[in-house]
Image (cartoon, rainbow, N blue to C red):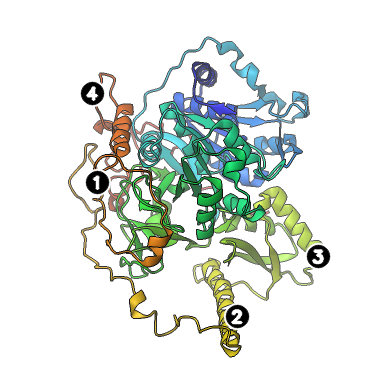
Amino acid sequence: MTMNLLPSQATDVAKVAAALRSLGVGKGDVVCGFMPNAYETIVSALGTAAIGAAWSSASLDFGPGGVLDRFKQVKPKVIFTVNATTYKRKLFDLRRKVDEIVSELPTLEKVILINYKSALPVNLSDYKCKEKLAMYEDFVANFSGAKPSYERVPFGHPLFVMFSSGTTGVPKAMVHTVGGTLLKHLEEHLIQNDARQQDSMFFYTTCGWMMWNWSISFLAFGSRLILYDESPLEPDHYVIPKIISDSKATIIGMGAQLYDRFEKIDAKRNLCKEFGLGAVRLVLSTGSPLKEAIFRYINAKLAPGAVIGSISGGTDIIGCFMGATLSKSVIPGQCTVPYLGHEIKSFNPRGEAIQDQQGELVCLTPFPSMPSHFLNDTDGSRYSKAYFERFPGVWAHGDYCIIDSATGGITMLGRSDATLNRGGVRMGTAEIYNVVDTFAEIADSIVVGRQIPQEKDEEILLFVKLSPGSVLDDHLRLAICKTIRERQSPRHVPNKIIPIADIPYTNSGKKVEIAVKQIVNDLQRRQQELERLEAARRERMSNMGPPSINMGRGGPPPHMVPPPFQSQQQPNPFSGGPPGPFGVPSLAVPPPTHHHQQQHPQHQQQQFAPPPQQGNPNGPRPNVIEGVQRLLQLFKNDDGRGAGPGNQQNMQQNHPGGAFNNYQPRYGASGDHYGGGSDAFGNQPPMKRERR
């Protein structure tokens, strides 16, 4: 279905907002959605934002354990959910899941149930939590005459609570602000992607992925959003191209693995001609690196002439660090440019900026869409450890990358920490441990991801230390996989379960996941290198061709060495600097980088040309100027004067967006607009997890 906030749809938002107000929901409260990517989900989220409450959501494929790990932290007053869902044409009854989730949330006052799948008749008496249930249509029935009304809040007021993948325990609850989120999303939609009111966007996502939050901001300037919540390959492999064609979508996006699937199904099939996808002008890919071959496939068969944007960022910033631009050629395999306001570098282990070799992705400038804080992090230590422990005063994102000195493009290489990444979906190892620990047969375990180079994906390896007298037979393997599937999701199920004698730990009691991950991946790379060398030896022995270029100890030939990177010492931008309009150091946009005029030959051959230039080819494209103007127009004061995204009195001086080195926890303090510490944003002690 489609959505673009027509008057009737705005009325639906107003009705939800009024109904929530009638329950006493407001600033400092959280409303949750255990929902599909559906119309009612977006209406509920926007209605929540309208009254100054915060929204948090989880995907329907999460098990009760995964949902509770998240929702217990935010202490919701209201939850929106559905009676059932379908996937791959199979109906899933959600009654048992809903009952289990509701029973573990003592702060919950109301559960709003949507009859999403009429094939499963709704009978409220079938639910154990029936005294808290209300049907959606009954919930809003008394507010049919409601008019849109919005609670005025400061720039730093909570809008979304997002969750990390849960690598080191319970997923971290990250609070994203109204101003930071909207400013970041509109910068990407209006300026980077040149979105217009007449555009229609289809982005395949669930409510458990930050791309859902990112997508609904597309409605802020009157554009149209196309919603779909089913298998991307059912009832046939081409359901998504059909949706794109029928809806006349101009901007499309999905995880990189889906583009890969289309190419594998039939690389020769011209989907653009067959389904009439000529309206598509921008193709976005994220979740995992997009392979060079898939860039070429999209350019040849899916959307010829469209700009291909491999975008990369994360839940932590509820947006992207880098992606496409309409004014520069696309290099297959690379994110084209850093996005506005992000000074992106690649650091070696010594904290030195490097190019043309693998390093840690870092950002040297503060930016508005950083989390304001984590819940249950009273002293800010978890926040600091998550981003600034690796390189003090510098945001380390946890990804490996290579910055090309010739093109300025960024090649993403995957996670540098222990987070699992299957099919572009990041998952926490702790979510698997929480299930495995319930088996008496398993004394201990460690789980890591091993890269599959041909697929640019990961397989999950679960190593288990068995309890005395236990045997890892097929029955136990199946039981572990079945329980993980039910309690977490199908994506969490390991590819292999391997018995080992013991589990390695650090002196501080942490499992040595990263070292194990490096070992299993290095062994695989060594094996592949041996196979490559053996194949080359056989080729030479059989006189089938000349030996390949020696890239071994001596390095590449001189003509292949890229130009050196001239490192310069720069002052730490987080230690001070001239204040911006909100009392924090300015978030200056770095000047455009002038790359080498003479590029590597392979880059000259592989570039996809940008759209035709208008006006001065060396100046900014008109769309960039217009995009900035339209963005500023959305942030005007009531009296019509142009304004920034907030007022100085609303920006707290200790906001981490001002100076990382001066971070102080900003919740639970006197005068804090979140309340006196009694709500989800108050000074709450960390949750204790008990082994079951």
- Label 1 crowd (10 A; few <14 / some 14-19 / many >=20): some
Q: Earlier in the sequence, mark 2 or mark 3?
A: 3
Indicate the amino acid at tag 1: Ala
How many numbered discs sit on the rendered protein?
4
Residue 152 vertical placement versus 272 (above, below): above
Secondary structure beneath label 2:
helix
Please tell me which of labels 1 and 2 falls first in the chain: 2
Q: Residue at x 41, y 61 (%)?
A: 605
Secondary structure found at label 3:
helix
Residue wearing tag 2:
531
The residue labelled by disc 1 is 588
**Residue bearing the label numbered 3:** 474
- Which comes before the other along the chain, label 2 or label 4? 2
Q: Position of residue 388 (x, y in %)?
A: 36, 57
Under mark 4, the amino acid is Arg
Residue 647 location in percent, x, y?
26, 30
Q: Which residue is mark 4?
A: 641
Residue 224 seen in this snapshot: yes
- Precedes in sequence: disc 1 or disc 3: 3
Q: Label 3 is placed on what type of residue?
A: Asp
Give the image location of residue 290, x and y in percent. Answer: 51, 56
| Distance from the alpha carbon under mark 2 to that under mark 4 | 67 Å
Task: Please state which of the two labelled residues, at mark 1 or mark 2, is closer to the viewer.
Answer: 2
Q: Secondary structure at mark 1?
A: loop
- Which residue of the protein is positioned furthest toward the left in this rendering? 578
